[in-house]
Structures are given as C-alpha cells and as structure tokens.
Amino acid sequence: MRDLNAIGRIGIGNHGSVTRLVFSIKELRSRQVLIHLMRQAGLQIHIDAIGNIFGRLEGSDPKAPAVLAGSHLDTVIHGGKYDGPVGVLGALEAVRTIHENKVAVRAPIEVVCFVGEESSRFGFSTLGSSLVAGEVQAKDLTNAVDSQGTKLADVLAGLGISSRHLPSLARNPKTVKAYLELHIEQGPILEAIGKKIGLVTSIAAPSRFKAIFSGQADHSGTTPMEMRKDALVAAAKLIEYVETICRKYSPMAKGRVVGTVGAMKIEPGVINAVPGRAELSIDIRSTSAKSKERVARLVKQRAAAIARSRRVGVEILDIRSEDPVPLDKRLLRLTQELCDRKQIDYEIMPSGAGHDAMQIAKIAPAGMIFIPSRRGISHNPLEWSDPDDIALGAQLLMETMIRVANESL
Ligand SMILES: [Zn+2]
C-alpha cells in the first residue's frame, strides 16, 4: 500500500484523480520510481526499446523460461490509482516476499511493467505488450495520433523504433513460461455477489473505428431547415443506433456485445453554425468474435444508410480490430485449486475490459486474477479497492507464481 500510494501521487490532480498518459513526464516518473523499487528488491532490470520494464529474480535454473507477472502504470485522463499499479506492485510484493522468505523457485520470475496499456492518448491500447507479443504492424500505427496532433509513429521514431524495427521488439516465446496479471475488476460483479476473487476465462476485445460525417457548415440563422446538411444530426442517429443494436446483442446467448460512442468532435463547434463535420469514435466489444464483427458491420452499414438518406458524406476509419482472447485453462485450474485449498470464494468470469494479458496470451499461457472494485467504478478518481482484497489477490498471485515456477504446466 505504501508503494501503491507513492505511485498514486504521481500525476495526482483534483479530487484525487490520477493522470499519467503514456510517454508523459508523469508516466516516465512512475516508471523511474518502479525501477528504484525493483533495484531495492534486488531484481535484475532489463528495459526494452519501447520502455517495458522487466525486473528479474533468478531461480535455481537460469536457463528455464521465466514466469512473468505484472501489468501497467499508465492511466487514462483523470483516472484512479488502482488500475494497473495493483498488478505491477502486487507482483513486486510477491517477488519480495519470495525473496525474503527464501522460497525456492526453479524458473526465474520477472516483474513486468508494460508501456501504454491505456488507449487514452493515441487510441492504441496495450502498446508495450503488443510489441512484446510481436503483434504490431506499421499499418496499425497509421491512425494513432494524440489530441495535440503528435503521431505515435513519431514518438516511436524518437525512441529509435522505426516501422521496420517493430518485429525486433518481440520477445522470444521460448523465454516465457507463463504470464500472470492481477487486476482490479473495473466492473460491479464481484462486489454484487460478495466474492473477493475473480478468475478470468477470456478477455473481450474491442473493434474500434471512427465514423466521420461531413455535411455543410452554414449560418444557423439564414439556412432554412430543408436546405441544411447537418453532420451532427446524422451522427446523433448513429449514436442511438449503436445503443439499440448492442442492446439487441446484450444477452449471453447472442454473444453479449457492448458498444460505446465515447468521443466526438464537431466542426465548427459553435452555437451559431450548422455542424459541417462530426467525428464519432466507436468502440464495440464482446468475448464472441462473431457477434462483435456482426455488430460492427451493422453499425458501419447503418452509418452509410444514414448518410445516404440525409445527403451527407460519411467515411469510416478503422482504428483497430482484435479477436477476443481465451486465457490458459491450466492456469485457471491451478488458481481455482489454490482458492479451494485456502477456502477463498471465487467467481469464474470473462473480462469485459482489455488487458496486457490478452497480448501475452498470444505467445505464452496467460492467466488473470481479479479483485473487487468498489461500485464497479474505474477510469475515474472514485476507483477504489479494499487493501485487504489487494493483499488477498497478491497472495494468490504469489502462490500461483511459485507453483508455475516450480512445476511443469
Ligand atoms: Zn488496466
């Protein structure tokens, strides 16, 4: 909790909100503090080109593939202090405890902090872990630009990473035995059913795209209603459709799809002008790839139909589309067994939010442990998790790490 609070003070603003956007001064500072803590814990530190940090504790077999555990330290704008740091510092505390108690481990253990898990700055999520998994192609970076107009590709170039270097950031899968991530649930389910631990089966993945309506910016006083080409009214119809279609796909049997229009830009964006341009950022998620793709396709078709009927233009810009990711069944069974033995009441559940684990799952067995979030609130200064739950989660994480390090999966 001391470390968690120390990291939580970096980027703190009004009402306890925390803002550490990827590659900002605050985010870099949080990484420095982590490196310091890892050094104090006696870990061997390796930092890759993008800035992912690996703090390694050797086991008795230095040649064995490592057990990785961690999460991220970057945050959304005005977020909380638990999303990410709980997993990084939980893993660090687990390794410290293993070290202090001289618990024998065969495989090396690495505490990991991945860069840029949140998509808040560039609209690009799980950046560091995607690179480690070898999942980033140059074309994925094309539309990744922050609100200041800074291109992600340029930031990477500044770090010496040109598009042809992207594959070289991938980690050899043979060096990773497993990846474990402790995380706050960021949803209301565990609290509602009174359970302390969630064991994650699979991670829902987003399809993200922009719909940009272009009409005609006109004087709001002199342009008759029937002569307008209002881009925002067209956009408004699409926003409502996203909600309608996702409600239709909300039952588990239909794949449980959620969809959100979370950002919008209007031009000229003044009270006395008919909007000439409206840009919507749309996020569709599900643990069913089929349902998600179907809904995303329907939304795009509807955008075209609305544009036709209202005689405005529409352009669809794909940002990123990913498949839902199943997590490793053996790790799930192992965590289940540990919970049963310790008489911890757990829930087996999917994750609606994306996490670094969904990238690492592509190169190694990956597992996730959730702890409750008060009122399910996250990406908000009110985000809070009980210190006892954090401790319980870290304890379970540690015992899983030890078992995985010492046994064959
Ligand atoms: Zn997170």
Image: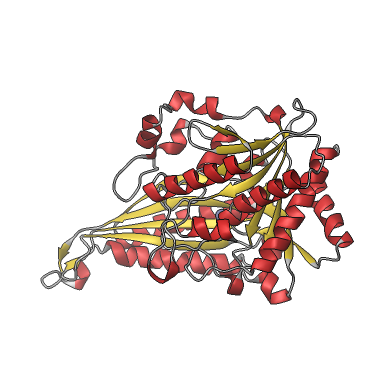
Residue at 74% x, 64% y: name it: 197
Q: Which corner quadrant holds the C terminus?
A: top right
User: Is residue 320 visible in the rendered structure shown here?
Assistant: yes
Residue at 40% x, 50% y: name it: 26
Looking at the picture, tell me which residue is in the foreground, 293 or 164.
Answer: 164
Q: Residue furthest right?
A: 341
Q: Residue furthest left?
A: 222
Q: Is residue 329 left or right of residue 291?
A: right
Residue at 79% x, 39% y: name it: 405
Q: Is residue 308 left or right of residue 86?
A: left
The quadrant where ligand 1 appears is bottom right
User: Is residue 251 visible in the rendered structure shown here?
Assistant: no
Position in image of residue 178 (x %, y %): 73, 40
Looking at the picture, tell me which residue is in the foreground, 349 or 395.
Answer: 395
Q: Is residue 283 left or right of residue 181?
A: left
Seen in the picture, residue 358 relative to 270 is either above or below; the reply is above
Position in image of residue 136 (x %, y %): 52, 35
Residue at 41% x, 34% y: name it: 156
Seen in the picture, residue 107 relative to 38 is either above or below; the reply is above
Q: Is residue 399 left or right of residue 151?
A: right
